[in-house]
Image (cartoon, rainbow, N blue to C red):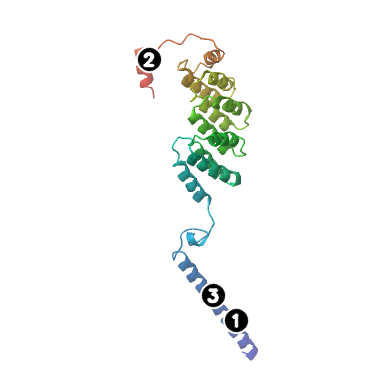
Amino acid sequence: MSVRLALRRSLRASALAARACALAALVALAGCQSFIGYRGWPYPERDRTSFHTPAMRIDTVKQFASRSDGTDSAEQREYTDQLARQIQIEPDPLVREAIVRATGEFRTPLAYQMLEAGLRDESPQVRTACCESLGARAETRCVSTLASVLRDDEDKDVRLAAVEALGNIKDPTAVAAIAVALDDRDPAMQFVGVQSMRSVTGKDYGGDVEAWRQVAAGASPPEPPAPSIAERIRDATRF
């Protein structure tokens, strides 16, 4: 074997040994980082960074919601002011949804304005949350707002949420608003419309959409006869 060939083989063996040592060191370092002081990606210690994840922001928003006492005091207005400032700069739709739901717990003038403004959010989830929060308030002034959503929003889930929310408002004006759902060709929309009509009027025409349309128009169709005992037993035992 020539001296040159022996020298070449020796250099190659040294290089492979160096790579193996480097790889072993890297694996050992990764193993240490996997359990020493690690609390979650991407920062090992929360107190060493100012980064706030969406989950952390949602937790903070929920804490605000728990401070609502149903009054229109200066303190309650300050809480909704902070929520309003946050939603204006919040990029994550899930956090904006949480802000809207928290806002729905307050009874300040700004809270209602925020819910109305949220109906123009680009996220259907946020708009749905606004409808649900307005329905939970069950205030007559919410009827026209929800009726506009039912009539104009392009997302079916948002429109369904608006119909369901209208069913919580026991006011005659809600009946006319729900009529739009009864005239929709979507069976799901008609079904929720019927449920809301039953909730608002206290009447029961079953699933007879045409009868409910007459009610929405101001007529009083005869209510179906009450089921017999045999029919009620049959329905109760039907699988």
**What amino acid is found at the position of numbered circle 1 in the picture?**
Arg
**44 vs 212: above or below:** below
91 vs 66, left or right, is right
**What amino acid is found at the position of numbered circle 2 in the picture?**
Glu
| Residue 200, horizontal then vertical, whole percent | 48, 20
Q: Among all residues in the image, which is located at the extreme front? A: 74
* Residue identified by numbered label 1: 12
| Circle 3 residues within 10 Å: few <14, some 14–19, many ≥20 | few
CA gap between label 1 and label 3 equals: 16 Å
**163 vs 39: above or below:** above
Q: Quadrant of residue 115?
A: top right
Quadrant placement of the C terminus? top left
In this orientation, does residue 94 appear? no
CA gap between label 3 and label 2 equals: 80 Å
| Residue 216, horizontal then vertical, whole percent | 55, 15
**What amino acid is found at the position of numbered circle 3 in the picture?**
Ala
- 1 or 3: mark nearer the eye: 3
Q: Nearer the viewer, residue 5 or 119?
A: 119
Q: Nearer the viewer, residue 92 or 40?
A: 92
* Residue identified by numbered label 2: 231
